[in-house]
Amino acid sequence: MSIIPMRRIRFLFWVVRELTGKYKRSLLIGFLIGLAVAFAIGRFSITLSSQLFTKTVRVGIIGEFTPTTLPIKIQQKISNGLTQLSADGSPQASLALSWESTESGRLFLFHLRDGLTWHNEKSVSAKDINYNIRGATLNPIDERTLEVHLSTAYSPFPVLVAKPIFQAGLRGFGPYKVSAIRLKGDKVDYIKLVPFKDDTLPVTEYRFYRTEALATLAYKRGDVDILEDMSSAQALSQWGQTTVIEETNFQRIVTLFFNQKKQLLMEKGIRQALGYAVGELPGERAYSPFSKLSWAYTDKVKKYDSDIVQAKKLFSASNVGSQSATLTLSTFPSYLEVANSIAQSWTDLGLPTTVRVISSVTDDYDVLLSAAELPPDPDQYPFWHSTQTQTNITSYVNVKIDKLLEDGRQETDPEKRKLIYGDFQRRLTDDAPAIFLYHPKTYTIKRGK
């Protein structure tokens, strides 16, 4: 081990002191530049690492949507509504922490949550609420209070405002923000969502396909890794490393709709006979126009389980039983197999039935087999009230049903509403303008086991 002489140490000290004094400014600037560069490199490496290791989920969706009609699952990732819906369809707190109704359901006061920001970091306030609902006037009282006046009483209004709120450019205040969107015409072809604040969330890309066949092809090509809400998994269940998740969709009911303008179907007895004549069905049996999960659902209704004896009894007693009549059952390609089975059952009953495949609903059908999408609230005024000629596709007219539907959307007491809708379900299923068949299964298909 060598020893450095003291004279040399003093010499080095003088040199350093002279250089420091002479070049102090340059050394300071160099130090600061070096510090800044080191900091920038550190930030860049963190960002690069985040980008390299952030998971990206690629999802295929079937259907055509505009930016304003995106599936509710996607909308809810980007933003929230004043309320949100529980599994039974009842409204819960979301942006609005609480609300109350006065003036017999014509005035609602919403009290907003504090501390939420839009994706541009600006605070969410009452003046930002921009629902365009006919007959509703929105009046911000202050930053956290919104008053809504309705032209007529409408008790399910808190359910309507569960719809997510957006500013221009699909800007919301949810956990994800829109990073990119691509259109074909006015339809969304691709949309990319990135986490707004929580970097542990995966990036999610959605691609849209007009048909299930196109979505299946995209999955096989590797364009997407997940397909949601498929009506069948048959084409992909054995494809490579694929997982199939089967679920019952309780918000959809496959239904037989009877056209009340057709002379053949005006008699309740023949409609009931046709209901009892339906044979075995796929999916979970449905008996009511409401979801089994709905807070207003009752199973105390007339059930049209397969009963050939009862079907023949009603058919023989009807005016049709002694006539030579025929029937056409219209349906979409997805339900062709079920339609053929039902048509055969009705033919065996004594009413020759043919099946017609359609691409859209027209008002000249005899019987329509299709899926009905259920609203979250039990208010089904548009579907069954006699005045709703555009949406009451069966042309159903029943004064008692009309009155129940009118009362149900005005009554603010939940227990009284439940009684009203229980009566509605019993009367509607007995009169049988439609036969509610089953809740269909839907499939989520994922790459990997």
Image (cartoon, grey):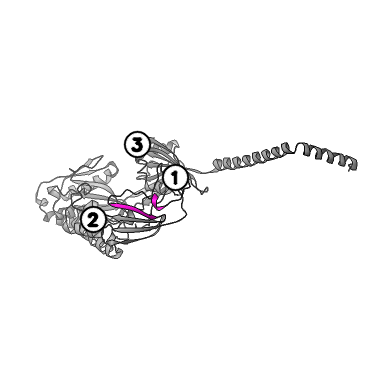
SS type, badge 3: loop
Label 3 sits on residue: 186
The CA distance from mark 3 to mark 1 is 29 Å
Label 1 sits on residue: 446
Label 2 sits on residue: 306
What residue range appears in magenta? 118-144
The CA distance from mark 2 to mark 3 is 46 Å
The earlier-in-sequence mark between 2 and 1 is: 2
Residue type at the position of mark 3:
Asp
User: Residue 10 appears in which quarter of the rendering?
Assistant: top right
The earlier-in-sequence mark between 3 and 1 is: 3
Q: Classify mark 3: residues with Cα within 10 Å, few (<14), some (14-19) or many (20+).
A: few
Q: Classify mark 1: residues with Cα within 10 Å, few (<14), some (14-19) or many (20+).
A: many
The one of 281 and 75 positioned closer to us in this rendering: 75
Asked whether, in this view, residue 298 is left or right of residue 348, the answer is right
The earlier-in-sequence mark between 2 and 3 is: 3
**Residue at (45, 45) in percent of width and height:** 177
Residue type at the position of mark 1:
Lys
- Residue 68 % position (x, y): 36, 43
- Residue 306 % position (x, y): 23, 55
The CA distance from mark 2 to mark 1 is 36 Å
Residue type at the position of mark 2:
Ser
**Residue at (11, 51) in percent of width and height:** 321
